[in-house]
Amino acid sequence: MTDKDNNEQSLHEKLGAKPTKEDEVERDESLDEEISEAEQQLNEAKDKLIRAHAEMENIRRRAERDVANAHKYALEKFISSLLPVVDSLEQALQHSFDNDSAKAIHEGIELTMKMFLDVLQKAGVEQVDPINDNFNPQFHEAMSMVEHPDAEPNTVIEVFQKGYLLNGRLVRPARVIVVKG
């Protein structure tokens, strides 16, 4: 008899014979191990799915925030290029005009300046004019510091050039003179 015949005979004997308690216990333990392994694989798959879903949600939120910021601050370079025009108009308004034709020009500049600032405001631009405010390095650039007996230390007493914000983000700091502290 060959090994194959012996195995077949042994198999037939087992099939014909009733399983013993040991066989049932072995089979139950084997099934328990398989079930435990399958549950572990299921839990790992669930965990991976939850993590993948959370990652996708984070990517979606980040993309939405980036798009919103791109829309919100798209005008920043354009606004920066317009600020010298505002500065020139402000300087023109500081000069006095003596005759009637010069006064008419002054009024025209005032109206132009007002219209220009209104347009900037509608675009989300705010002026930073910190006269008599405490110096804040996030919004002000100190051009010089001076002694001043009547003013509080660290106070802005003069503004060389106004600052500007676009939707709360600094486009240009206000250039100021600050009282020494």
Image (tube, rainbow, N blue to C red):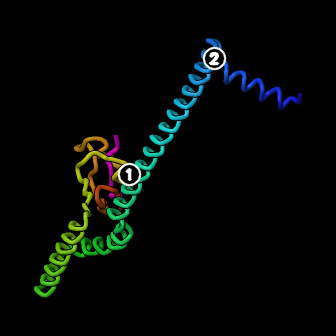
Vertical placement of 151 versus 5: above or below?
A: below
* Secondary-structure class at tag 1: helix
- Image check: 127 left or right of 41? left
Q: Is residue 98 visible?
A: no
Q: Residue furthest right?
A: 1
Q: Does 21 lie within the magenta span?
A: no
Residue 34 or residue 54, whichever sits in front = 34
Quadrant containing the N terminus is: top right
Label 2 belongs to which residue?
Answer: 18
Residue 47 or residue 128, whichever sits in front = 47
Q: Quadrant of residue 181?
A: top left
Instruction: Give, as a three-letter code, the residue at label 1.
Output: Arg
Number of on-image labels: 2
Residue 90 or residue 121, whichever sits in front = 121
Q: Is residue 118 visible?
A: yes
- Image check: 149 left or right of 29? left
* Secondary-structure class at tag 2: loop
Label for residue 139? none
**Image point 23% across, 49% down: which residue?**
132
Q: Position of residue 106 (x, y in %)?
A: 16, 79
Q: Main secondary structure of the magenta part?
A: strand
Disc 1/disc 2 C-alpha distance (Å): 63 Å
Q: Position of residue 18 (x, y in %)?
A: 63, 17
Q: Quadrant of residue 93?
A: bottom left
Q: What is the span of residues highlighted in magenta in the rendered image?
A: 172-181
Few, some or many residues within 10 Å of mark 1 (<14, 14–19, 20+): few
Label for residue 61? 1
- Image check: 19 left or right of 151? right
Q: Position of residue 163 (x, y in %)?
A: 31, 60
Mark 1 vs mark 2, foreground winner is 2
Vertical placement of 91 versus 173: above or below?
A: below
